[in-house]
Image (cartoon, rainbow, N blue to C red):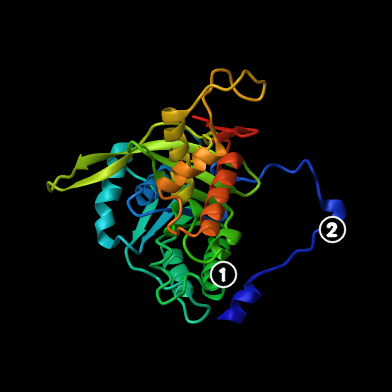
Amino acid sequence: MHGQYQNERQFRLIHLSELDENEPEPETRVQRLMPRTGFATIYGPPGCGKTFWAIHLGLTVAAGLPFFGCETEKSGVVYIAAEAGTGIKKRIIAARDRLGITDAEFYLITEAPNLGFSNPNDSNRLISDIQSHRVPNLGMIFLDTVARVTPGSDENSVQHMGAFIANADRIARHFDCIVVGVHHTGKDDGRGMRGSSAINGATDCEWWVRKEEGGTRSAKLTKMRDGEGDLSMTFDLDVVEMADGTTTCVITELSQPEVRKQAPKVWKPTGATAIAFDALVEVVRERGTLPAESAHIPSRTPTVSMEQWKAHAVLRGICSSNEERAVNIAFQRATQKLLENKKIGTWNSHVWPVL
């Protein structure tokens, strides 16, 4: 099998003189948002709406409809629902009806192929079964989720994930399409996809789907081969009732892709540093005095001495030990952190909180 695959490929050498800076921009399956070929991921924590977002993407491409205001190349789509199984049918029906699609080259597979090993794996059979249906202009194949199509594999193993990536790449090359893996984040949602960084290194495109404070959901383009980065759009999940009385959700697009600047994080003291800061606020409120006018101290700002602050911080429990050296170290560390983050001001023996 491995040898046969190698014989199917050709490696063309491009001479330096053939390189042209005026070559057309790389083609996209979704304008600005998804490459035409390669490997992409849609990732997020459980319950963020990533499967609904992926279905919405697949159906708009299959029908040639705009996706969040961006043009799509009308293409055949195969959605492998390895995790949701037959239960995903209602989600697709509801999304189809919301989009007003009466017919489109969209196909569903509810069995989970095993693509997690170099040999044996189900990539040959999957390619054969998809090919036998002669899907017109097949452009996208979804793998939902990466975990379910790599059973028995170690997500943290570069070797195991490398085998999955090779299989996904083989499928993409065979059909000249984009393969999209739906994946989970780890415990820290902001640190990206779960498992080996090999997946991140292999992707041509990555979308991070998450639920924002207040309930609105967002999808952020965290990686795009030869394209824009940091594009973000927002959406809602609307609950709809099905004919059998059950409910599911559908996507409502709220905003079109735009570059959004993240608001700077406000540093907040924790642990012993928080105790020290609260102690300073208290002691200044109770015993602070106005120093003589100075260009180094804000006008009409009450201050206390370092000794007064330290004594109050000790009373507040800045250190669990009564040993003088341990107390001094705890206080010095807290003072340094507060200074670095501009939460206190000092001049000579004066100290005051910056609120």
Tell me the kind of residue under disc 1: Ala
297 vs 11, left or right, is left
Say which residue appears at 68% left-offset and 42% top-offset: 25
The mark that comes first in sequence, 2 or 1, is 2
SS under mark 2: loop
Q: Which mark is residue 166?
A: 1
| Residue at the left extreme, as displayed | 245
SS under mark 1: helix
Say which residue appears at 52% left-offset and 57% top-offset: 324
Say which residue appears at 41% left-offset and 57% top-offset: 78
> Residue 140 appears at what percent x and percent y?
48, 54
> Residue 62 appears at what percent x and percent y?
42, 46
Quick one: quadrant of the N terminus? bottom right
Q: Is residue 212 visible?
A: yes
| Residue at the right extreme, as displayed | 17
Q: Tell me the crowding category of disc 1: few under 14, some 14 to 19, or many 20 or more residues within 10 angstroms, Cα based.
A: some
Q: Which mark is residue 312?
A: none
Tell me the kind of residue under disc 2: His
* Viewer-proximal residue among 271 and 289: 289
Q: Is residue 115 above or below residue 74?
A: below
Q: Which mark is residue 15?
A: 2
Give the CA separation, mark 2 to mark 1. Answer: 27 Å
316 vs 191, left or right, is left
